[in-house]
Image: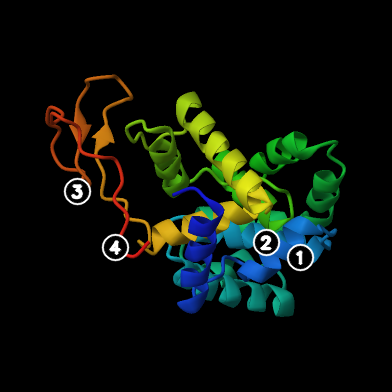
Amino acid sequence: MFTANWFFDLEKKIKDMGADSDAQSFDEIREMLSNPRRFSADEFADMCAYVILAGGFSQKTAKRIHKDIMDYIYKNGADFDSLFAIFHNKNKVSAICKIWEHRAQFCDGFYNCADDSAKLDYLSKLPHIGKITANHLARNLGVDVVKYDVWIRRLGALYAGIRRIDELTPEIKKACDDMFARLVAETKLPRGYIDVVLWKAAQLKIISMDIPFAGEGVPGGTWRGSGYGKKTTPPAPPVPPFFEKKGN
């Protein structure tokens, strides 16, 4: 695992399944991260809307809702009541309306940031974005960053040989960063592209995630099984944290 051959095999399996997309196709994401361009204010707001809607939904559902929302906005503008009739989430619809109303200001603010760190901080302060979603949005806008979502955190734990903690602790973040550094060196691809391929492979269970859960990261502490049931004492010896499906 964590070699160029392993990564490109995952990429091929995903493409063969026809599942190679986030907001854009894998090829579009790879090209955008390799040769970033400036997006228009409308495109910027459109991408904000997608990541806002993606939280808590499957990709298929998020894309459908996003299309319905943006089709209405492009034809009629961002009217809260009309959009709420399409999608009954007051907070998300309100955020999308605010971003659309101020899209030129927000887009200019993003591109005026001095570096990638400043861009992430800026995006995290937009309505209904936050720190994790800011990474997702930044990557979709061509910034070579990773999302650090739950799937990536679990893979980082596997890479580092530590027990899984579904929080972005400093230890888990370092494990993820080390994993990406190795795969960048192995594949010569942008981190953001590697991120989306690993995320999709884990989501599709090409890489299994049926693993023990470490309680609060305390050595020898309690853990929960993959079903997230009652806490028990950890087994001895510990169960290996990840299992890859046969053929990977």
Density class for disc 3 (Cα within 10 Å; few <14, some 14-19, many ≥20) is: few
Residue 13 badge? none
Residue 158: x and y, percent? 38, 40
Residue under circle 4?
Answer: 246
Residue under circle 2?
Answer: 47
Residue 227 badge? 3
Mark sitting earlier along the chain (1/4): 1
Residue under circle 1?
Answer: 43
Q: CA distance from mark 2 to mark 1?
A: 6 Å
Residue 28: x and y, percent? 69, 69
Looking at the picture, the colour scheme in use is rainbow
Between 16 and 225, the residue placed more toward the observer is 16
Q: Is residue 69 visible to us here? A: yes
Residue 138: x and y, percent? 69, 49
Mark sitting earlier along the chain (4/2): 2
Is label 1 in contact with label 4 (beta carbons under 8 Å)? no
Density class for disc 2 (Cα within 10 Å; few <14, some 14-19, many ≥20) is: many
Mark sitting earlier along the chain (2/3): 2
**Image quadrant where one finds the C terminus:** bottom left
Mark sitting earlier along the chain (4/3): 3
Residue 43: x and y, percent? 76, 65
In the image, what residue type sits under mark 2? Met
In the image, what residue type sits under mark 3? Gly
Q: Quick one: SS at disc 4?
A: loop
Is label 2 in contact with label 1 (beta carbons under 8 Å)? yes
- Which residue is pictured at 76% across the width and 35% down the height? 118
Residue 157: quadrant of the picture: top left
- Which residue is pictured at 73% across the width and 76% down the height? 74
